[in-house]
Amino acid sequence: MAQKADQAETKGAAPFIAAFPEVSALATKRMEEISQLQAQLFQGMPDINKRWMDRMQSEAALAAQFTAKLAAAHSVPDAASAWEEWITRRMEMATEDAKLLLADSQKISEAATAFLSSGFKAGANGGGPQSK
């Protein structure tokens, strides 16, 4: 029974595509545009990944430095000084991380916006939903 339904769906799809070649052409064009968007987004990923890996390594180095300073502290003021230095540097790094995240997000948003805006323009000219 399920095979008959699958066959009916397959048989029904081919005449639809044959009857509306512009729909098929538009779908093909959209898939190519999506593929280009993915390529554009993934092109920048290695740089983003390297930058974040470098950030993680610098955080690990900061933690190691803090641990060494705290272990070498012989008094409460020495320990407090180590904590203060670590917190100050950690806050600076958090601020830098936020700026990097915002910049990376902006690049991705710009690529997606460019894709969507070109898609809607094509839809308006190509008889899509925008042309009504």
Image (tube, rainbow, N blue to C red):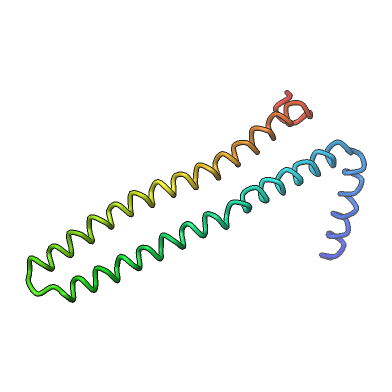
Compared to 132, does 33 lie above or below?
A: below
In-image side of 18 versus 29 (left or right): right
Compared to 120, does 33 lie above or below?
A: below
Residue at x 24% of width, y 68% of height = 66
- Quarter containing the N terminus: bottom right
Compared to 109, does 55 lie above or below?
A: below
Image coords of residue 111 (percent x, y) = 60, 41
Image coords of residue 52 (percent x, y) = 46, 58
Image coords of residue 20 (percent x, y) = 88, 38
Compared to 93, does 114 lie above or below?
A: above
Residue at x 65% of width, y 38% of height = 115
- Return the residue nearer the eye: 113 or 17: 113
In-image side of 68 versus 102 (left or right): left
How many marks can you see? 0
- Return the residue nearer the eye: 131 or 78: 78
Residue at x 35% of width, y 68% of height = 60
Image coords of residue 98 (percent x, y) = 38, 49
- Return the residue nearer the eye: 120 or 78: 78
In-image side of 45 versus 126 (left or right): left
In-image side of 25 versus 115 (left or right): right
Residue at x 43% of width, y 49% of height = 100
- Quarter containing the C terminus: top right
